[in-house]
């Protein structure tokens, strides 16, 4: 049985989330009549970020006296200069709060400070951002560890495995770290590649996996940093006529969940995220800051759950 390091233990997180629940339900000051949200995410082509944005808007609508919510939603495409300009635009348009999925952890401290000097709370979602008022993310180390421990069990703790990596943001770095720690527990598992960047996209997964199968045709297992790249990797396997490997992932995307049910699926399962819940908590934290409240927590980590073909009925759909 795999052991997760104590410092990453999801049971500690459950205490955090219980504290968060009581804090969200605490008595509030007068409700605001209008909220304008600025949201900058990594890739609006990924349904995960669309679900995150929808969760943010839904929570804002629950907080104001009427549905007086305006959402300014941009995609950074993992471009630091572009995302800096987006945050500057939010400041100039006098948004009430900013949610940001940072392209690089330490690239936005100055512009975040400018927003805060105007009284605009900045909440980091999905990935960490230096200088943000608070952070809400998946427990990404736990998600990677969970997925790769399930992969190892499926392989009977032996075989050759590759990691399909992605953009160097905190969420992906932590998932890969968790995966590597899980696999390292089993001496008969050999990690033969871990640094190939899929870009976190289906197209990138297809291209990268095609290269992997050319170089390592006899692999048994794959860990993908997200579901779009995993679906691309599966497509590469099908095009190569390969059916002797399986893919574990992180996300819980509807398209991945659907493919799990197919008879010809190469997908083992996914450690599911909760993008809507993530955004809802972030908006609540920003709202409380606007109300002059002190936050009980500055960082919330939401544990991932393993979903495979055997427990699809329990899967949370974005």
Image: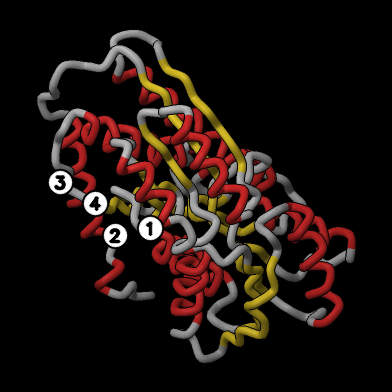
Query: Is residue 318 in view from this perspective?
Result: no
Tag 2 secondary structure:
helix
Tell me, yes or no, whether the two marked residues, 4 and 1, touch with CB atoms within 8 Å.
Answer: no
Q: Position of residue 90 (x, y in %)?
A: 48, 34
Read off the residue under disc 2: 10
Tell me, yes or no, whether the two marked residues, 3 and 4, touch with CB atoms within 8 Å.
Answer: no
Read off the residue under disc 1: 139
- Dot in front, 3 or 2: 3
Residue at 44% over, 35% down: 91
Disc 4 or 2, which lies upstream in sequence? 2
Query: Does 188 sit left or right of 275 as displayed?
Result: right
Question: Crowding near pointer 4: few (<14 within 10 Å), some, many (20+)?
Answer: few
Tag 4 secondary structure:
loop
Read off the residue under disc 3: 296
Query: Is residue 187 in view from this perspective?
Result: yes
CA–CA distance between discs 4 and 2?
A: 17 Å
Tell me, yes or no, whether the two marked residues, 3 and 2, touch with CB atoms within 8 Å.
Answer: no
Disc sitting over residue 298 in the figure: 4
Q: Quadrant of the N terminus?
A: bottom left
């Amino acid at each position: 049985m795999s052991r997760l390091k104590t410092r990453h233990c999801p049971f500690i997180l459950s205490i955090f989330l219980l504290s968060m629940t009581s804090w969200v339900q605490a008595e509030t000051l007068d409700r605001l009549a209008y909220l304008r949200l600025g949201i900058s995410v990594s890739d609006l082509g990924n349904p995960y970020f669309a679900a995150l944005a929808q969760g943010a808007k839904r929570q804002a609508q629950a907080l104001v006296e009427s549905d007086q919510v305006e959402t300014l939603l941009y995609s950074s495409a993992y471009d630091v200069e572009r995302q800096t300009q987006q945050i500057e635009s939010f400041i100039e348009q006098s948004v009430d709060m900013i949610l940001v999925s940072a392209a690089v952890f330490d690239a936005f401290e100055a512009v975040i400070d400018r927003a805060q000097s105007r009284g605009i709370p900045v909440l980091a979602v999905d990935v960490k951002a230096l200088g943000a008022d608070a952070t809400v993310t998946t427990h990404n180390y736990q998600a990677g560890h969970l997925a790769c421990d399930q992969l190892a069990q499926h392989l009977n703790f032996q075989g050759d495995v590759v990691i399909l990596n992605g953009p160097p943001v905190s969420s992906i770095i932590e998932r890969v770290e968790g995966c590597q720690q899980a696999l390292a527990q089993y001496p008969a598992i050999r990690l033969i590649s871990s640094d190939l960047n899929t870009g976190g996209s289906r197209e990138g997964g297809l291209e990268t996996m095609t290269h992997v199968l050319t170089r390592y045709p006899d692999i048994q297992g794959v860990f993908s940093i997200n579901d779009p790249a995993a679906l691309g990797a599966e497509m590469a396997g099908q095009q190569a006529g390969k059916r002797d490997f399986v893919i574990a992932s992180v996300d819980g995307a509807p398209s991945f969940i659907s493919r799990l049910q197919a008879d010809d699926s190469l997908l083992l399962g996914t450690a599911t995220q909760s993008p809507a819940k993530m955004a809802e908590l972030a908006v609540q934290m920003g709202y409380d800051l606007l109300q002059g409240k002190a936050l009980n927590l500055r960082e919330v980590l939401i544990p991932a759950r393993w979903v495979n073909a055997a427990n699809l009925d329990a899967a949370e759909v974005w």
